Image (spheres, rainbow, N blue to C red):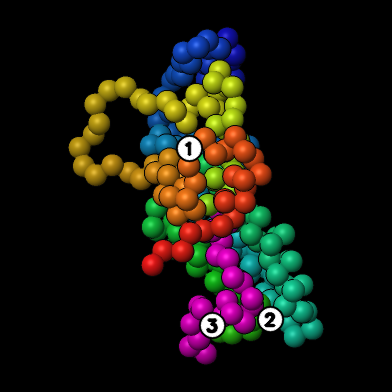
């Protein structure tokens, strides 16, 4: 048995074929950059990442608007200092529409400043992306990270905890109302868009090629 103490919270994990987790948290704590909440949702994690990325964007405002820094240099700075913070830990995020809008808005803000286009110029987001040569959206990067992680976990031994957890189904009755969109719902949608099939993760090269290619929907 392994006992982990995180700021006076005791978590017991029994290393047997049937894992036992207790207790249920009724409050949140931060551990290794991840925020654990009672409802198990990722909204607080995502908003925290968005807030930190916004702070960095604001701090580098002079860099984005500079005429002396090339577009490619700005993209390198964005990828290394903003994007890496914004999507840190995104492999396990379950995104709702509000989360997607917040992440997209942060990316668009950085792109507009880098292109030296203000909102008063009344240019569309597509125009800004074209000027910055930003073909892929940050949400596409998140999806790719999630699919790569999913394929990696599926190849694990069945006794490994990550694989046990993605296939675990809680017991008990479901609550009334519409169910939340889960992480696996997003994975299955992304697999369908890329024509990925169950078991293809065993061919790592082919899996990674398909992960980077999205099927055109007409």
Q: Which residue is mark 2?
A: 65
Residue at horizontal 56%, vertical 18%? 159
- Badge 2: few (under 14), some or many (20 or more) residues near its Cα, within 10 Å? some
The answer to whether residue 143 of the structure is visible from this angle is: yes
Q: Against 125, is 79 above or below?
A: above
Q: Quadrant of residue 133?
A: bottom right
Query: Of callouts 1 and 2, which one flags the residue occurring earlier in the amino acid sequence?
Result: 2
Q: Main secondary structure of the magenta part?
A: helix
Relative depth, front residue between 73 and 119: 73
Where is residue 166 shown, x and y percent of the image?
47, 31
Q: Residue at 68% of width from left, 66% of height from top?
A: 78
Mark 3 and mark 1 lie on one chain; the one further toward the N terminus is: 3
Residues rendered magenta in the picture: 120-142
Dot 3 falls on a residue whose secondary structure is helix
Q: Position of residue 56 (x, y in %)?
A: 65, 63
Secondary structure beneath dot 2 equals: loop
Q: Position of residue 90 (x, y in %)?
A: 56, 47
Q: CA distance from mark 3 to mark 2?
A: 17 Å
Tag 3 residue: 127
Q: Residue at x 64, y 59 (%)?
A: 83
Labelled disc at residue 198: 1
The N terminus, quarter of image: top right
Answer above or below: position of 108 versus 208. Answer: below
């Amino acid at each position: 048995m392994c006992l982990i103490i995180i700021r006076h919270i005791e978590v017991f994990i029994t290393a047997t074929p049937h894992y036992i987790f207790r207790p249920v948290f009724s409050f949140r704590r931060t551990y290794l950059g991840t925020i654990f909440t009672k409802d198990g949702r990722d909204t607080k994690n995502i908003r925290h990442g968005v807030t930190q990325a916004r702070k960095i964007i604001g701090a580098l405002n002079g860099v984005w608007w500079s005429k002396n820094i090339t577009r490619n240099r700005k993209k390198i700075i964005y990828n290394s200092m903003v994007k890496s913070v914004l999507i840190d830990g995104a492999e396990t995020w379950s995104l709702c529409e509000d989360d997607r809008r917040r992440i997209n808005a942060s990316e668009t803000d950085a792109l507009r400043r880098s292109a030296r286009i203000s909102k008063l110029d009344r240019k569309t987001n597509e125009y800004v992306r074209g000027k910055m040569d930003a073909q892929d959206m940050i949400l596409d990067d998140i999806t790719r990270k999630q699919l790569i992680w999913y394929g990696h976990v599926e190849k694990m031994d069945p006794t490994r905890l990550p694989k046990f957890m993605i296939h675990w189904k809680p017991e008990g009755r479901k609550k009334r109302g519409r169910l939340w969109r889960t992480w696996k719902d997003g994975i299955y949608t992304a697999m369908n868009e890329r024509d990925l099939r169950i078991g293809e993760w065993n061919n790592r090269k082919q899996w990674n090629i398909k992960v980077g290619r999205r099927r055109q929907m007409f």
